[in-house]
Amino acid sequence: MKKRLFYLLFAIGFSCNAQDNKGIKQQLNDTTRKILDISIVGNALTKGLSDISIFDIVDDTLYLINRDSFLQINIKSGSISSNEKINSFLNKQLKEKKYASKLVSKKNHFYLSFFNELYDVSKVGDAKKIYSNSYSINDFSVNNNILIASRDTIKIISSKGTLNSSLSFDFTDAGYIKASQGICYSATSEDNIYEFYSPESSNIKVKTFASLALNKEMEEPFVSYASEDFFIAFDYWKRNTVYILKKGAKKNEVVKTISLKSLNYAPSHVEIQKEEGQPNFKIGYSNGTYYAIALAKGKLKIFPFTFNE
């Protein structure tokens, strides 16, 4: 196994109205690490935040939906703001009992799904519905084209909503993994991991990777992110270590572990039980940096980290 070097920076939470949070601490280890905390209740923009599943990261900005608030968190400066134009769109959807389920951010606009509908929303709040179906949208991705996973199919659509291709596959309502390309899916840790991608507008391909149950390093493995070559995972109940796994058809080999024990992140057993199988611990990626995002003990936490690939 090649020796892999990494650095881990740690940032937690942010302050309201573009003000840096006070109470910055530093830890000296291999590198200097900044540690920041934000109280969910103590910040007007994050008050009531209980789920972080609707998020994306682009150019050092974390986009996160808190019910009818579209939050924009600058990871470098530690500032937080809310897009009032998009908030108006979200509020209109809520009045119709439509709840956002996934967010994909692009340079100048965002894709948002609501049950069985997909919208293209600009930064100034202009929204255009580009897809709707009788089945709910379980997951979607936007790269060269748009992939949409529903109950029994995965489809390719154009940016205007035109159906280009489809592939039959039996999905459950859970098991989707945030991915750098396409859609990754695994119903349980005992199942294989499937990666659906589309190098062309009318061609859906599938890669099959080994079950995580083969990895004895984790008692209850949970994959949170899939890059082109790696799976980023953690143990569902412990969450004190991030595991970097090289993708493989026979076994996903652990090639790096990143300990979080010294970073004061320890969700209680009660908090974990309340999540009902959907952990408030997510992994994102942008511009060469991975981000672990978490809610624990009333605080929003973000852990940036990198490793040599």
Image (cartoon, grey):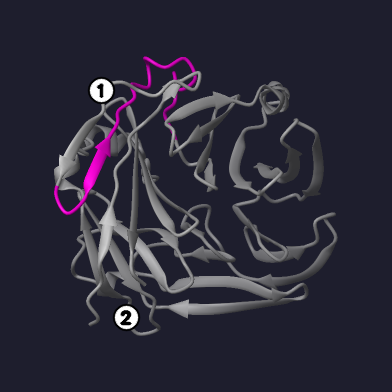
- SS of the residue under disc 2: loop
Question: Residue 262 or 269: which is nearer the viewer?
Answer: 262
Residue 32 % position (x, y) = 22, 45
Question: Would you name the residue on which mark 1 appears?
Answer: 23
Residue 9 % position (x, y) = 29, 47
Residue 124 % position (x, y) = 75, 31
Quadrant hosting residue 126: top right
Q: Residues within 10 Å of mark 1 (few under 14, many from 20)?
A: few
For image coordinates 71% across by 22% down, the residue present is 88
Residue 43 magenta-highlighted: yes
Dividing the image into 4 quarters, which one contains the N terminus?
bottom left
Q: CA distance from mark 2 to mark 1?
A: 44 Å
Magenta part of the chain: 29-51
Sequence-wise, the earlier of marks 2 and 1 is 1
Q: Above or below — where is 78 with respect to 59?
A: above
The amino acid sitting under disc 1 is: Gly
**Label 2 close to label 1 by CB (< 8 Å):** no
The amino acid sitting under disc 2 is: Lys
Mark seen at residue 251: 2
Q: Above or below — where is 91 with respect to 300?
A: above
Residue 8 magenta-highlighted: no
Q: Above or below — where is 113 with respect to 20?
A: below
- Left or right? Give the position of 9 relative to 123: left
Question: Residue 189 or 233: which is nearer the viewer?
Answer: 233
Quadrant hosting residue 153: bottom right
